[in-house]
Amino acid sequence: MINKEDILFFQSISTCLTELTDLERYSHDETEDLQSIPGIVIKPSSSQEISAILRYCNERKIPVTPAGARTGLSGGAIPVTNGVLLSTELLNRILSVDTNNHQVITEPGVITQVLQEKVAEYGLFYPPDPASKGSCFIGGNISENSGGPKAVKYGVTSDYVLNLEVVLPNGEVIWTGANVLKNATGYNLTQLIVGSEGTLGVVTKIVLKLIPHPSNDLLLLVPFRKMEQAAEAVAEIFKAGITPSGLEFMERDALIWTTEFLGSVDLDVHDDHEAHLLIEVDGFDPEQLMSEMEKIMTVLESFDIDEPLFAESKAQKDALWKLRRSVGEAVKSNSIYKEEDTVVPRYQLPQLLKAVKSIGDQYGFKSVCYGHAGDGNLHVNIIKGNMNDEQWENELPKAISELFKEVVKLGGTLSGEHGIGLVQKQYMPIAFPEITLDLMRGIKKVFDPNNIMNPGKIF
Amino acid sequence: MINKEDILFFQSISTCLTELTDLERYSHDETEDLQSIPGIVIKPSSSQEISAILRYCNERKIPVTPAGARTGLSGGAIPVTNGVLLSTELLNRILSVDTNNHQVITEPGVITQVLQEKVAEYGLFYPPDPASKGSCFIGGNISENSGGPKAVKYGVTSDYVLNLEVVLPNGEVIWTGANVLKNATGYNLTQLIVGSEGTLGVVTKIVLKLIPHPSNDLLLLVPFRKMEQAAEAVAEIFKAGITPSGLEFMERDALIWTTEFLGSVDLDVHDDHEAHLLIEVDGFDPEQLMSEMEKIMTVLESFDIDEPLFAESKAQKDALWKLRRSVGEAVKSNSIYKEEDTVVPRYQLPQLLKAVKSIGDQYGFKSVCYGHAGDGNLHVNIIKGNMNDEQWENELPKAISELFKEVVKLGGTLSGEHGIGLVQKQYMPIAFPEITLDLMRGIKKVFDPNNIMNPGKIF
């Protein structure tokens, strides 16, 4: 797709990699089982460089896949074979922390946790915290509209994005909005770019809203003897008027596999513990948090639970959160698997769980479920286990289709926070009829008539 | 534009009005000085009827302007002369309050306050509360992405919209998303429709997120001897870690004109009171609210303020809020005026105020400023006063252009919550370069290739 002349041009603009070992390193993200070798990896260090690169590629219809830290789980950053992989890793500066307006302006290649820690120095809080926050880039979070455990109280990435600098496929550089908290000035291009998975342009500067950083939190791990009761308890907590800052569900195997994988956590999982909820409240007033936890305990007492574990130190809280954050990796280390990112209205969670297990029984697969139950966002890790390759390749997609149809029937959709990318796009017609997909394709064409930006993703 | 045959068709589908007195009634919204007589007013009572109407109009390129309660301030609901005015007033049912998931599904023609009161019966809260909440429709709020005083803590309309049923110009009916709190499934069509001012389709069903209703609030009216200090105090309150549920600014004349207009409020405005802040905190714990108010008082003590008025009863709170909500009407009753809806990062508010007054001095107009200072959203009411018609028609637009240029320089934009509609569209090139406006026009064309939906608005 790209030739020697192209490579010379790119090298005249930006840092480039062309050695096969390097190209291989950039050929995949964290999505199981998928890779594709780019023709070149370009690491621009400014909007201007990106503008020159895109203009060149647009004229020659060379496909460009923007990539952040490549921690994605839907294949959004997997390049086109022999196309351009455009890495944002050198765009890694936090440009300004505006303590007067509670805003931060950053480049996309900043690690999310680094950004969070930087603004926390000023008493400010950027809440979205995907499990990969220690390695993922804020730019990738914007591409996929990432969430994380805090989303249940504080919202997802899109809720914090005020304004974006974007290089369009034709090389033009625009700002999508303004640095303001409310905006009724034309179409909302900002929110159109958030979650568009690099298919409309390359985000080069990001203006985020910040909030005061809560000073206190409390954390509770609750074992349930019936998995579905754990799911039911989730909606009951909200109905009691409490908005926890974390409300995570982990099925038995998720917890056991992860304690074994980490080796470091000492947790007494009884034979009759079918599932756990990890529940956090946060705020500024310790007494109020205690009273919220008491209300939560009152709700939980009407379910068949075992003794809850109340985290007594920062170290214990960190250990429990590390456990939750490592479930994905633990499952990955255990078996070939496929991860689905289903999301439903939260009260429908028990029905979703039932559907997952019943479809699993029917198609002969085992699943490990966990996720952001407070948002109704359930990660369903389908384990290959004893399935043979033929079943895995041909039967499983039918099972996943059935699952997604059930999800849509429950008022939900395909992805809560991982995006569609490559691996879910075949299922998009379950979420949207052709007329709606045509609107999305039409919007894509307005931004990118030559289809050079991350082609083959979403649609 | 429409003929007798068209009218017979519309009458076969829906309730219609064709008498001149009726047409005149629907020829304007609350925007000063603008009207245009439609050829027919159609009041459909279902998505199906709207679908049939739009399909018919699309084939014949008949312009259709959707209208809610016509309380808008940017001319968004003003019809094309002799075109179709499509009123959503019969789509006035709240379809379901889902207490399990904290969601409400409603039709667009429900009055915002009626919706708020309905969900409050279940202990639930829909926060966006434009000044016109007692008469405006929720559908109009979605068209203009309305805000209101609570936005400073709880966000604007767009923050609560989960999913929309939309009739497209070709008559197809789609849902834009799913009834979920997080969504990473394709482009965000939901947020593209919010704030699109009826130019992309007709919203017929709305799924809104709700939150637990706060049980307590405290309200304080603070007189400042220096107007700019009132604006400065706004950012200082946030920097102290407090997020008020209301933080409103009223310039001296706004308060005096409104007390006179209402006649019912007894307020002692001294000669040296240049401006007032109205400050509300809300939540669940009365003690915590008291402690927040104390922190706010500590911040205020460093400014030149007079004795604050602490509202001691529900009646007094209602009276103060009524005062604030009536400023627009009071100014309107006093003089011919033009209202601008400027928004900047909140710390830039003093600079914005300075710019308003200095441009006023230069062009010879007086202005009354008030608004949602916590969001940096300042309503600038430009008073005709002694300006002659020539100055008002020809010089004032130059002054407004200068003001908007200053706003954009400060990181802000043209409209925070009123929309662009008819009256601000000439200023759009100040907010966005042609390349960005072309993207918006391209999106419009994807949805509405024949340009029948509310033509002439925004662009």
Image: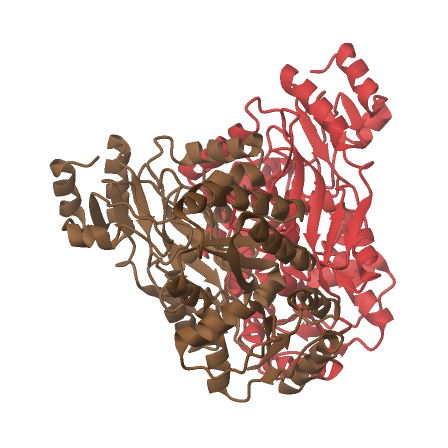
Chain colours: A red, B brown
Which quadrant of the view contains residue B155? Answer: bottom right
B108 relative position to A72: left or right: left
For the C terminus of chain A, which image quadrant?
top right
Q: Quadrant of the N terminus of chain A?
A: top right
Is residue A269 shown above or below A150? below
- The quarter of the displayed image where residue A451 is located: top right
Residue A159 visible here = no
The x, y position of residue A274, in whole percent, is 65, 68
Residue in the foreground of this view, choosing between A234 and B457: B457
Left or right: B127, with B81 as reference point: right
Residue at 28 percent across and 44 percent down: it is B51
Q: Position of residue B88 (x, y in %)?
A: 30, 55
Number of marks drawn: 0
Residue A142 found in image quarter = top right
Q: Position of residue B23 (x, y in %)?
A: 20, 50
- Looking at the picture, tell me which residue is in the foreground, A175 or B92: A175
Q: Indicate the position of residue A411 as horizontal and vertical percent values.
A: 46, 56
**Residue drawn where x is 26% and y is 31% of the image:** B59
Residue B458 shows in the view: yes
Q: Tell me the residue at 37%/61% (across/down).
A: B137
Vertical placement of B361 versus B375: above or below? Answer: above
Q: Is residue B259 left or right of residue A103?
A: left
